[in-house]
Amino acid sequence: MFPFPSRKITLQSPLSPREVETALQALTGEKRSRTFRDIFLGRRSERPFLGTVGSSTFLIQRNINYRNSFLPQLHGRIASGPHGSTISVHMRLAFWVELYLAVWIGLVAFVMVPATVRAVYVPHVMVVFGLALPHIGFWSSARWAEWMLVEALKAQRDTPTT
């Protein structure tokens, strides 16, 4: 959803769709609520992703040991391809994060209209900050997630459709 970050990529893997599912399941741990004890003791799954992998779809995100609402959610489809599998991945922010940011930026923009001369820069800076922050948090993790998928699935990138 514009102006928020998202990326669509297509990967070609020599693995069969079933082998791709198996490889993704090996990389993906169960997504569950973390307790204070988990956070305090630094416990986390050893797998690089958390989420679910189905028969031909997956919904995963990077496994990190801290909070980051701007992590990309990887929605993917696995299909048979000419030489193995075609994996279509759409990386985007979580729906609730996009909704919150849209409301927040909208309210700031609404306040900008009757702004006084001395307060005219604050709402502008808040809008720029509100648009820049998700991009910074998203793109650093999106590049890592794409690299991890390419390596694990022995895949080649098609031209990204971003």
Image: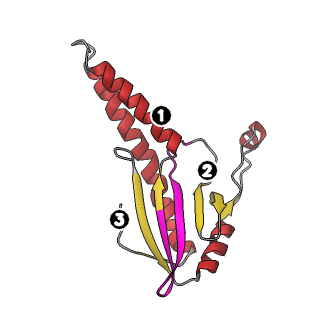
Q: Residues within 10 Å of mark 3 (few under 14, many from 20)?
A: few
Tell me whether circle 2 and circle 1 mark residues in contact (CB < 8 Å): no
The answer for how far apart the CA atoms under marks 2 and 3 are is: 27 Å
According to the image, label 2 marks what residue? 64
Q: Look at 40% across and 46% down and name the residue there.
A: 135
Instruction: Name the foreground residue: 159 vs 44.
Output: 159
According to the image, label 3 marks what residue? 161
Q: From the top left corner, tell me how far across and down residue 151 is, in percent.
A: 53, 73
Q: Residue 133 is drawn in which quadrant?
A: top left
User: What amino acid is labelled 1 in the image?
Assistant: Tyr
Which of the two discs, 2 and 3, sits closer to the camera? 3
Q: Look at 36% across and 33% down and name the residue there.
A: 129
- Asked if the magenta segment contains residue 70, the reply would be yes
- Asked if the magenta segment contains residue 78, the reply would be yes
According to the image, label 1 marks what residue? 100
Q: Residues within 10 Å of mark 2 (few under 14, many from 20)?
A: some
Tell me whether circle 1 and circle 3 mark residues in contact (CB < 8 Å): no
Q: From the top left corner, tell me how far across and down residue 87 is, in percent.
A: 50, 72
Q: Look at 28% across and 15% down and name the residue there.
A: 119
Magenta part of the chain:
68-89
**Residue at the extreme bottom of the image, as rendered:** 83
